[in-house]
Amino acid sequence: MKIVFLGPPGSGKGTYSSRLVPKLGIPHISTGDLFRENIKNETALGKKVKEIIDAGKLVPDEVTAEMLKERIEKPDAKKGFILDGFPRTMSQVEALDKLTKIDIVINLILPDHILIKKIAARRQCRKCGDIYNLADINEDGIHMPPLLPKVEGKCDKCGGEIYQRDDDKEEIVMSRLDVYKKQTAPLIEYYRGKNLLKDVPVVGGPDIMVPNIIKVLETISS
Ligand SMILES: [Zn+2]
């Protein structure tokens, strides 16, 4: 099954995606990971991306799409994949449509005031990109327990340092949410029009949401 995850920053896309991997037996592909892997392995595309990022520029859609093409052609993605962080714009949707046919788009929905709390409390591993969250949210029928590392400040997976990304700082979260809404509104309409979009309200942490998402996926696989 080829799945796209849409959801504002802080909606838990990355966390749910990685937890779905062992249950669905398909890889989680995020553009952040793709960039990191290609740069680390010094592939031709990785070198190109590093130059672009080092120059403080945005990686062009063609380059991201090319990286994605290579990734989804790998044997582990034969049965499908979970795409997170791509597409973000209509031109990326067009690029993706040229590469493959998506089966379902999960659109995570969460109110702004909760997103803001969650993003400001988000921490990431500097080495492997794993996500943690310090916020303990229990309001408006939404209960999201914190996702704390076992050892404070250290990643469970690789022992790397856990830090707050600059773009997670509260003062820029609002504008990131605005940008997200403006950018994705046309995508949501597009996928809804193709009957691929499933709205999934976020009501809890991964223990609640992962089974919820699986139920939604089952509606199309059966
Ligand atoms: Zn790590």
Image (cartoon, rainbow, N blue to C red):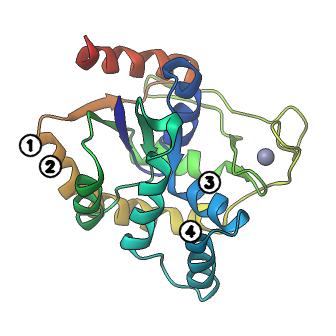
Q: Residue furthest top?
A: 222
Q: Name the N-terminal-most of marks 2 and 4.
A: 4
Tell me the residue that label 3 is attached to. 120
Viewer-side label of 2, 4: 2
Tell me the residue that label 4 is attached to. 171
Report the residue at 48% width, 21% height from top. Answer: 24
- SS state under label 3: helix
Answer with left or right where residue 156 lies relative to residue 72.
right
> Disc 1 residue type?
Gly
Report the residue at 12% width, 34% height from top. Answer: 195
The picture places residue 103, in percent across and down from the top left corner, at: 26, 33
Q: Is residue 169 visible?
A: no
Tell me the residue that label 1 is attached to. 193
Viewer-side label of 4, 1: 1
Q: Are marks 3 and 1 in contact (CB under 8 Å)?
A: no
Q: Are marks 4 and 3 in contact (CB under 8 Å)?
A: no
- SS state under label 1: helix
Report the residue at 28% width, 47% height from top. Answer: 100
The picture places residue 151, in percent across and down from the top left corner, at: 91, 36
Q: Are marks 4 and 1 in contact (CB under 8 Å)?
A: no
Can you say whether 166 is above or below 199 in the image? below
Q: Are marks 1 and 2 in contact (CB under 8 Å)?
A: yes
> Disc 3 residue type?
Ala
Tell me the crowding category of disc 2: few under 14, some 14 to 19, or many 20 or more residues within 10 angstroms, Cα based: few
Q: Are marks 3 and 2 in contact (CB under 8 Å)?
A: no
